[in-house]
Amino acid sequence: MEKQPSLFTPVLLVGCFIILVSFAIRASFGVFQIPVAEEFGWLRTEFSLAIAIQNLAWGIGQPIFGAMAEKIGDRKAIIFGAIIYAAGLVLSSTAVTPGAIQLYEVLVGFGIAGTGFGVILAVVGRAASDENRSMSLAIATAAGSAGQVVGAPVAEWLLGLFPWQSVFIIFAAAILGTLAALPLMRAPTPPASRAELEESLGGILLRALRDPSFVLIFIGFFSCGYQLAFITAHFPAFVTEMCGPILPGGVLHDIGITTTSALGAVSIGVIGLANIGGTLAAGWAGKRWPKKYLLAGIYVARTVAAGAFIMLPITPASVLIFSVVMGALWLATVPLTSGLVAHIYGLRYMGTLYGIVFFSHQLGGFLGVWLGGRMYDIHGDYTLVWWIGVGVGALSAIVHLPVKETRTPLTVPA
């Protein structure tokens, strides 16, 4: 009897560890929104723009690190990413002007690109067997959610002990610490047909960019970045300022969550916790049903959830319900989108191609974070930004429907 390939390989476990720490740090930035603005008297736009620039730099860096990993090796690309990430955090801790922290967030964004989904998912995808690939990508993505579970609450806890500058230094040491596990990450040569092996990176990029399905996937991922980045950066502050009070005698108060500030930080963790299950479910479903229909369904559900949340009174109960619902849909798009790219275009240049698609995600992230701060400073609330998110979510649901989920033909040179 033929032995079934193992799902949990060293590559998957190390990849999960690196993504977990990387995303724990990234997901905590919304917690710093109010402390940094209050210390320097900045407008909300200033720190929001820094996080927006971080998201944009992450998007720009993703295809660069994907191509770098395919040229010089995955582990070298990850090491470079971790060093840049740590440098950006250390420099951010020294910033005293908006321009400085906005500049240093470029380094943080590139660091996330080198230690995040683009490089890690490509390695995990190549190391996994065909039958385990969808679930492996989901597990690695869920590790990012696990990081989100702990990132914001840990940052909130550390801010109670240290100034925000010291917390950034601690985070820099944490991301460098992940490199100790890197020697265990040895991915095999990606399985590829003769046509794939002989096709150049430039050739497959040109073929993908001419493919309407690739363009539709690129457009569809925009709303995912908009919604996720806006909520990550602004939801803690939104909950702090807009949520009804946490009354004594209630469940939240009894377990120590007595302020809306604490609830805002915990809500990011709840989103991450719910998304572990949602992402794993997406990986399971992606092996059984067309990924484009699953993606369209996720975007429809997000649109309905966000619209209902903003129309109803903001209470501690509604915050937690929304966090659970949105969390179940949060990163469920990532294994489906990356799996769709790998299925249509093959594994050899998956890192670069997914990186290009991910750039759209980060363009949306830039707009969501920056617009959130800008609209808050103009109107004093986030209502308009929420409704824009509802609209782009509906658009993403529609554009995934015409995607042709079939392998594009490759031509082998004579």
Image (tube, grey):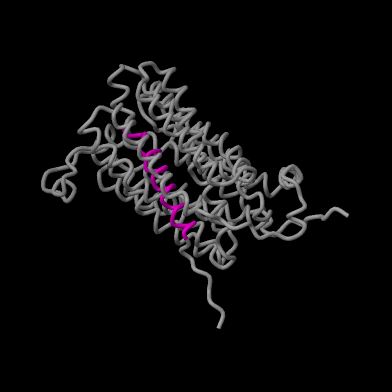
Residue at image point 41% right, 46% down: 180
Judge whether residue 69 can be spotted in this image. yes
Depth check: 47 or 187 in front? 187
- Specify whether 162 is left or right of 337: left
Depth check: 30 or 180 in front? 180
Residue at image point 41% right, 51% down: 17
Q: Position of residue 38 (x, y in %)?
A: 28, 21
Q: Position of residue 82 (x, y in %)?
A: 46, 38
Q: Which residues are magenta?
A: 10-31
Q: Position of residue 364 (x, y in %)?
A: 53, 36
Residue at image point 77% right, 52% down: 198
Residue 23 within the segment the image draws in magenta: yes
Looking at the image, residue 106 lies above or below residue 230: above
Residue 375 within the segment the image draws in magenta: no
In the image, farthest residue toward the bottom? 1
In the image, farthest residue toward the left? 249
Quadrant housing residue 339? bottom right
Q: Position of residue 211 (x, y in %)?
A: 73, 47
Q: Quadrant of the N terminus?
A: bottom right
Depth check: 44 or 164 in front? 164
Residue at image point 30% right, 32% down: 167
Q: Quadrant of the C terminus?
A: bottom right
**Dominant secondary structure, magenta:** helix
